[in-house]
């Protein structure tokens, strides 16, 4: 027996904020467009992507660690206002 399983593996990515691995479907993809971080909900925007838990704690950690420019391989600071709005909207939907 080769040790392979019949179940398909769920792709995992690492959150740039807390550095924990999670299923790709549980994370929010972020891309850099013209000096700003833009949330990519459908995962179809072109360019290099970074993944983030849709939680303000992870977003604050990523901003403090300057993780977005490093993960997206761009020079200089990036505006994260759009990402912050998307995270707050996701948190509001999750709360009853």
Image: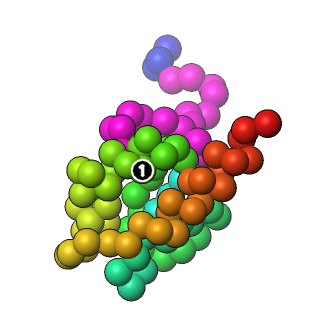
Whole-percent x and y of residue 29?
50, 58
Residue under the image location 42 percent in, 67 percent down: 80
Q: Give the image quarter of residue 6.
A: top right
Question: From the viewer's perspective, is residue 93 above or below residue 68?
Answer: above
Say above or below: 17 vs 30. above
- In the rendered structure, the answer to whether residue 86 lies left or right of residue 32 reads right
- Taking the magenta stretch, the answer to whether it contains residue 56 is no
Q: Which image quarter: residue 20?
A: top left
Span shown in magenta:
4-26
What is the total number of numbered labels drawn onto the structure image?
A: 1
- Decide if residue 15 is in sight here: no
What kind of secondary structure does the magenta stretch mostly adopt?
loop
* Residue 28 placement (x, y as % from top left): 54, 53
In this view, the residue farthest toward the right is 96
Examine the rendered structure and indicate whether residue 72 appears above or below residue 89.
below
> Is residue 13 highlighted in magenta?
yes
- Left or right: 72 with respect to 1? left
In this orientation, which residue lies closer to the viewer: 49 or 61? 61
Using residue 50 as the reference point, say whether residue 55 is left or right of it. Answer: right
Circle 1 sits in a helix, a strand or a loop, which is it? helix
Classify mark 1: residues with Cα within 10 Å, few (<14), some (14-19) or many (20+). many
């Amino acid at each position: 027996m080769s040790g392979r399983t019949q179940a398909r593996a769920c792709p995992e990515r690492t959150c740039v904020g807390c550095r924990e691995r999670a299923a790709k479907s549980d994370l929010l993809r972020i891309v850099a467009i013209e000096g700003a971080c833009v949330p990519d909900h459908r995962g179809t925007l072109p360019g290099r992507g970074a993944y983030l838990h849709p939680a303000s704690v992870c977003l604050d950690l990523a901003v403090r660690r300057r993780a977005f420019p490093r993960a997206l391989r761009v020079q200089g600071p990036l505006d994260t206002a759009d990402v912050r709005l998307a995270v707050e909207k996701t948190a509001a939907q999750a709360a009853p």
